[in-house]
Each structure stands twice: as C-alpha cells, then as structure tokens.
Image (tube, rainbow, N blue to C red):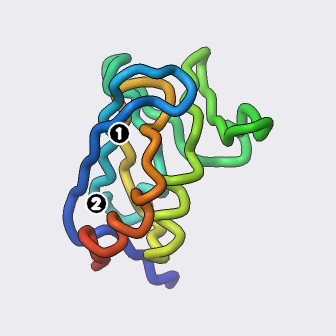
Amino acid sequence: MDVQRTLRRPISCVGIGLHSGNKVTLSLKPAAVDYGIRFRRTDLGDFEVPATVQNLAGIQLATGLARDQVSTTTLSMPMLTSAARRCSTVSTETSFRDSPVASWIPARLCTVAGTS
C-alpha cells in the first residue's frame, strides 16, 4: 500500500493572473485518498482537470492542462507547492485559467498549509 499525503488545511491567495492580467483566486485544499492532484476551474462551474500526462496541454512558457476544451495554465507554482510537501492528493481551485503572479506562493503555502 502506498502512503498518500495531503495538505493539513486549505490555503488561498488572490493576485493578478500571470498571463491574463485578471484578478485570480488560487486555493489549495486537502483531498481524499486516491483523489490525485486536480485543478478545478471555479469560473466554469467547478470543471476539473486531473494533473495527468494525458491532459498535458503545453509546456511552452507555462505548464498547461486541458480536458474537453477547458484549460488551465501557469501550474508550476501550485504543483511545486504540492511536490514540496510531498502531497499526492490535492484539490487546486482557480477562478480563471491562470495562476496569480506571486513568487512567494510555494514557500508560504508549504509553511502555512502543512501536511497530514
């Protein structure tokens, strides 16, 4: 049996989308066993895109995922946060297609969210 880890508690930040310039809310939340890492677009009715190789939509200038015509980009910061905490199950929600510009996100989220 593989040990799975998730965040101890939810954490959010608000900022300006790196590529869009729009106000974006980014939230990382604990997830259930076997949930994996998924990105949820709250602006599109909570449409989920699992972080899998099959959904990889691009790596030019930004990592992107897409499923059924819905995409999300600039995933390196939330993915780095999950990896730094060795999390295998995390629900990442964003209110737009890209993540906020904030180089402090990984370090801050790692400190505040913890793991369980």
Provide the residue designation for mark 1: 93
Residue 114 position within the rendered picture, expressed as x and y whole percent measured from the top left:
28, 76
The residue under the point 36% across, 50% down is 91
Q: Is residue 23 visible?
A: yes
Asked if residue 100 is positioned above or below residue 43 in the image, the reply reads below
Q: Amino acid at mark 1?
A: Glu
Q: Is residue 85 left or right of residue 15?
A: right
> Mark 2: which secondary structure?
strand
Disc nearer the start of the sequence (1/2): 2
- Mark 2 crowdedness (10 Å alpha carbons): few <14, some 14-19, many ≥20: many
- Mark 1 crowdedness (10 Å alpha carbons): few <14, some 14-19, many ≥20: many
The residue under the point 35% across, 39% down is 93
Quarter where residue 96 is shown = top left
**Number of the front mark, 1 or 2:** 1
Asked if residue 63 is positioned above or below residue 31 in the image, the reply reads above
Q: Is residue 9 left or right of residue 6?
A: left
Q: Is residue 46 visible?
A: no
